[in-house]
Image: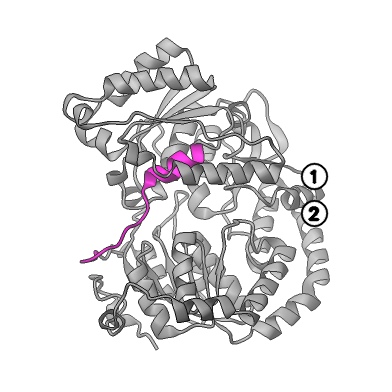
Amino acid sequence: MAINLKRSQVIIREKRLKSVIGYRGSIKDLAEKSQSGCLKNANRGFSQATNCNSGCAQGHLSSITDTAIVNHGPVGCAGDVAGANAGFQWGQHIRGWDKKNVQIINTNMTEKAVVFGGDKILKEAVHAAYERFHPRVIFVTTSCASGIIGDDIEATLKDAEAEVGIPVVPVFCDGFRSQIWASGFDAAFHAILTRVIKPPEKKRPEVVNVINFTASGRAAVTEIFGRLGLVPQFGIPYSSIEQIERWSESAATISICGTLGGYLGNGLEQKFGVPYVTALQPHGINGFDDWLRKLGNVVGKQQEVEAYLAEQKELAAPELEEIERKLKGKRVVVGMGPSFAHNYIRFLEDFGMNVEWGFSWHYDSKHDHGGCPSCTLELSKREKDIPVSVSDQQNHEIINLLKKVKPDIYIGRHPGQSVWATKVGIPTIMVSDEYSAFGYQGTIDFGHRIIDTLANNSLAVNLAKRIRLPYTDWWYDQDPFTFMESESKSHVTIS
C-alpha cells in the first residue's frame, strides 16, 4: 500500500507490511508464504522481555543536532535515554565534535496525570524544553500511559506550538501500538516527512541521501561516491534541521539497512519524487555490487560504477580467496534484524561457511515499495534451504538452539543478546557498526575478524566454565520453539 502521509500517526508494520515476530521454518518457505500472502504470526505461550518501539523513535530523533525531545510518559519510559545518550556520544566522538548530551525532557506522568489527564504537564514540558535548549524543532514522543488515557496530544501541541513559535511535532510511538520495535523508526520518519522536510527550492543532481545509523563509514562512502561524481548526504542522525529540510532536493535516496530506510526512502519518492534505490544491502561482495549498480542505474552512472567494481574485484580477489579457504565449512548461526540477518546469511554462505540457522528479530512480509524483501528472495533462489526463525530476541529460544546446534561461531547484532552466546561457550561477533562488511575492503576486514575470533576462543570457553545460565536441563531437553504456536514446526528439524 502507498504510504499515507495525510495521517498524523504512522500505520504500524503489522498492518502495513504484514510483519510478524513469530515464525519457524526455512528461507524458501518464508519467501513462498510472503509472496502468496499466507504468512501468519505465530504467538508464544511464554515470552521474555523485548524492546519498545518508543526507544527506536526517540533514539533516532534525539541525535538530530538542533532538536529537543519531550517524552510524554512516566519517568520509567525515559530509562532508555542512557542508551540513546551513549550512542549520541559515540557518534560525536567519531566525528571529532565537542561532546554534548541528548536534549530530552520527560513529563514524569504519575497516578494523578493518569487519572486527570496529562495535557497540563505536557505543555509545561514543551515550554521547559524550549527555554532550556532553544531548539529548531521539538518532537514529542508518546508512551503507553499517554496513549491509554487518551490525552489529546495534537490539540495540546498545536496550542504549545503557537506559544513557543517553533514546530512542535507529535511522534506516536506508544509501546503497545506495535510489537515490532522498528515501527518506532517509521513513526520518527513519518514526523519528519510530514512536518520537517520541505518542497525543493532547487534540485541538486550530484547529492544522494544516505540513510544510516551512526554513519561510521562516511569516509569510505564519500570516496566511492566521489569516483562516481556524487556527494553523499548522511542522516538522519547527526544532521541539523536545515540539512534535513533539503532532503527533497537530492537526486536519489539509498539506505544501509532495508528495515531502517524503507519508510523514509519511499516517502521521499512518493511525496517529492526523489527515487529510492531498492537493492540488497552493501554487505559482502554480491550485496555491495547490487547496491552500487542499482544506485548507478538510478542516477545515470552505470559506466563509472562498472569501472570501479572491476578495479575492486581485481584488487580483492587474492585475499578473498584466502579468506574463503580458511572459512570454508565453518558452521555459523546468525541473529540480527531482518534485513541484516538475511543479507549476512547470504555473504557468509558466499564465504563458504555453513549457516546452520538464521534468527531475525522480526520479519516484514513486504517492503513499502511492494513485494517480498529482495534479500529474502535472493536467498530462497539458492539450492540450499536454510533453516530460519523469527525470534523477537527471545533468549530462551536462541540459547536452547545454540546448545543443540553447537556452531563454530555466532554472529549477532544486539549487545544484550550476543553476550549470552558467549556465555554458552560459543565465540561471538557482535556487529554494532552498520558499516561492518561494507564494500570490498569491509568484506575482507570482516572475514579476517571471523578468522581471528575462531582462532582465539578463550573468552567464550572460560566464561562457559564459570557462569551458570538461568536455564535448567529441563529447558534444554525441550524443542527450542516449544512455546511457539507455529504451523511450520514440523518443516525443519534441528540436527
How far apart, in angstroms, are the residues tagged by discs 1 and 2?
A: 9 Å
Tell me the amino acid under the disc marked 1: Gly
Residue at horizontal 72 percent and vertical 41 percent from the top: 96
| Secondary structure state at the residue bearing disc 1 | loop
Instruction: Name the quadrant containing residue 126.
Output: top left
Relative image position of residue 73 (x, y in whole percent): 31, 34
The numbered disc on residue 229 is: 1
Tell me the amino acid under the disc marked 2: Glu
Residue at horizontal 59 percent and vertical 53 percent from the top: 256
The numbered disc on residue 32 is: none
Q: Residues within 10 Å of mark 1 (few under 14, many from 20)?
A: few
Relative image position of residue 203 (x, y in whole percent): 68, 30
- For residue 432, say whether it is visible: yes
Relative image position of residue 137 (x, y in whole percent): 50, 24
Residue 60 belongs to the span the image colors magenta: yes
Work out which quarter of the rendered image holds the C terminus and state it: bottom left
Relative image position of residue 130 (x, y in whole percent): 47, 19
- In this figure, which colouring scheme has been used for the structure? one colour
Residue 58 belongs to the span the image colors magenta: yes
Part of the protein shown in magenta: 43-61
For disc 2, the marked residue is 304
**In terms of depth relative to the viewer, which is nearer, 178 or 78?**
78
